[in-house]
Image (cartoon, rainbow, N blue to C red):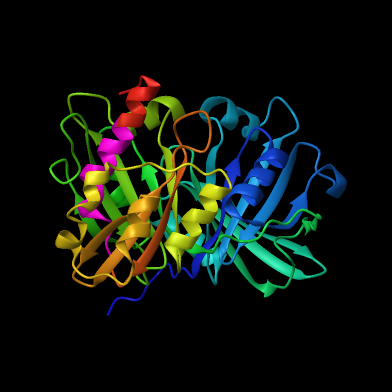
Amino acid sequence: MQTDFLPINGTDYIEFYVGNAKQAAHYYQAAFGFQPLAYAGLETGLKDRTTYVLRQDKITFVLTSSLVPDSPVSEHCKLHGDGIKVIALWVDDARKSWEETVRRGAKSCLEPCSDKDTNGEVVLSGIHTYGETLHIFVERKNYTGIFLPGFVSWDPVYKPSSVGLKYVDHLVGNVNWGEMNTWAEFYHEVMGFNQLISFDDKDISTEFTALMSKVMASSNMYIKFPLNEPAHGKKKSQIEEYIEFYHGAGAQHVAMATDNIIETVIELKNRGVEFLRVPDTYYDTLLDRVGKIDEFLAPIREQGILVDRDEDGYLLQIFSKPVQDRPTVFYEIIQRKGAKSFGKGNFKALFESIELEQERRGTL
């Protein structure tokens, strides 16, 4: 049996480059129930950027904005708008992770380095992936601090309660025409991931738009990265819209798991998060399609939650509208009741609802 040359313990954090980290942090607290954790900025000796760290259960969001007009952060925001820059992966050995991936063809963005403070040592390294997205390997087994060296505790009075989000289920990347197979091969050859599932334009299409997708997963299934590319259709797909407004490939959405999607979605809506809505006729034959489920149909219909079944069980999912003015980054809320798939049976209804939003924006 082949040993895993890149064992990954999970998602360490997701870092967004944003125009105003203070205000973005307030939004993710108020709307999504993230809790304040750590801070770095002028008060900690940084002169060029400010970073706020928020956490909800096992999900850590890092929000960074620039304090100067000419910096990698400000250039990223100018080109892409607010977006995901770093998908950090928690590993036992950041140096070995870097060596193994670079040896297999990855382009380095951060050679292994050690950061220390009174709480111990963190080792970081990193590689480039699609677009301007980076993977940072984080080794923190010898560290007891709140986040990383250089950060201080952030403990404001304002702490809205959690909405029940538990962990990152998967994170979707959008890549350009003809690039899906290239990046699927990258994750397989460079990082040792396996292809979990594949969808072509026959699986993911409507009358007007289509896309293709491959889901790459780490051997322990802790990390799952669907990779989407556009496919030819009569009109412009959501992937083309993303690439146009993001100006290139990038991370499209984070799927966050909950143990009670109905309660979570109700709370998110109460806090101002807007979700896509499929046609109500979707629910008329839902139970015929998916069989018996534990939940009552009425609240699922009322909240606009989608349900799909595979050979291992079923899942419930719902997708937010974009959370910023550019139609780029959005979120998926998912609850798995055994299912290991990604809602293939919901694609047509979901994409039709996305097309309605694109039509409103004039981008279809």
Left or right of 162 in this view: 186: left
Estimate the x, y position of residue 119 in percent, counting from the top left: 78, 70
* Residue 113, quarter of the rendered image: bottom right
Residue shown at 71% from the left, 25% from the top: 69
Left or right of 34 in this view: 258: left
Work out which residue is located at the far left of the displayed protein and give it.
Answer: 202
Estimate the x, y position of residue 160 in percent, counting from the top left: 68, 56
- The boundaries of the magenta stretch are 340-355
Depth check: give the residue in front, 109 or 32: 32
Question: With respect to residue 107, does 333 lie above or below?
Answer: below
Left or right of 125 in this view: 221: left
Depth check: give the residue in front, 163 or 288: 288
Tell me if I can see residue 179 in this picture: no
Left or right of 72 in this view: 260: left
Q: The N terminus is located in which quarter?
A: bottom left
Estimate the x, y position of residue 13 in percent, counting from the top left: 57, 57
Work out which residue is located at the far front of the displayed protein and give it.
Answer: 298
Depth check: give the residue in front, 246 or 117: 246
Give the main secondary structure, helix, strand or loop, of the magenta stretch.
helix
Estimate the x, y position of residue 79 in percent, counting from the top left: 53, 26
Residue shown at 87% from the left, 46% from the top: 43
Residue shown at 59% from the left, 30% from the top: 77
Q: The C terminus is located in which quarter?
A: top left
Residue shown at 49% from the left, 28% from the top: 326
* Residue 103, quarter of the rendered image: bottom left
Work out which residue is located at the far top of the displayed protein and give it.
Answer: 362
Residue 138 shown in magenta: no
Question: With respect to residue 77, does 93 lie above or below?
Answer: below
Count of number-bearing discs: 0
